[in-house]
Image (cartoon, rainbow, N blue to C red):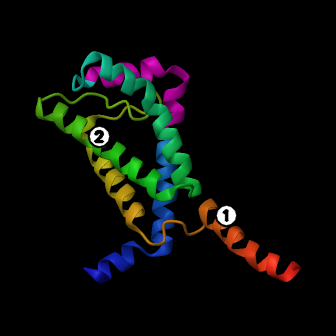
Amino acid sequence: MRTILSVIHNKWVTLVLRILLGSLFIFGALVKLPDIKMNSVNVVYEYGVLPVGLATVFGYLLPFLELAAGIAILFGVLTRLASLGGGLLGLSFAIGEGIVLSQGRDINCGCFGGVIDTMMSATIYLSIVMMAAGFLICTSPNRNFVSITSLVFNKLKAIPKILKIIS
């Protein structure tokens, strides 16, 4: 098990997962934003899993949550929190798709707005991969490899050294 985790948590594997997951969330958000009501709210409502009011709120928030998580994961800002949020979004997608599929319905998931038509029977696997990638990034000790967070903290660590040299 330790060997598997060392491979999965390799800094390059974690970086590739960050790039893929962050890009996927950003793309999904950007194709929903031009018409949020059509590409997100109506789709969440069509799932029939949430009450109308909650579906509306979730539908309006979803593209912004995806965009925020995607940018943060991609650039490594609050990486643990962002990847946990991304993993939880993937989990919510998988649960919603699982419920709809268990009812015998296979509808367009709305993952990529009107750009790509994707059926839930296929995207449930993508949702599971998104969830796993989010949780793997979150638990990786290398989650901040090549990130804004590591850049900022390295600069902050240098400040006492600079002050010592100056004084």
The disc placed on residue 92 is: 2
Which residue is found at the position 41% from the left and 69% from the top? Answer: 140
Which residue is found at the position 31% from the left and 29% from the top? Answer: 108
Q: In which quarter of the image is residue 97?
A: top left
User: Could you tell me if residue 64 is visible in this image?
Assistant: yes
User: Could you tell me if residue 113 is visible in this image?
Assistant: no
Q: Quadrant of the C terminus?
A: bottom right
Which residue is found at the position 26% from the left and 27% from the top? Answer: 107
> Residue 161: x, y in percent?
76, 80
Q: Is residue 118 left or right of residue 82?
A: left
Q: In this view, does 130 lie to the left or right of 96?
A: right
Q: In this view, does 130 lie to the left or right of 100?
A: right
Eyeballing the image, is 144 above or below 32? Answer: below
Q: What stretch is highlighted in magenta?
A: 28-46
Which residue is labeled 1 in the image? 152
> Residue 43: x, y in percent?
34, 23
Front one among 25 and 113:
25
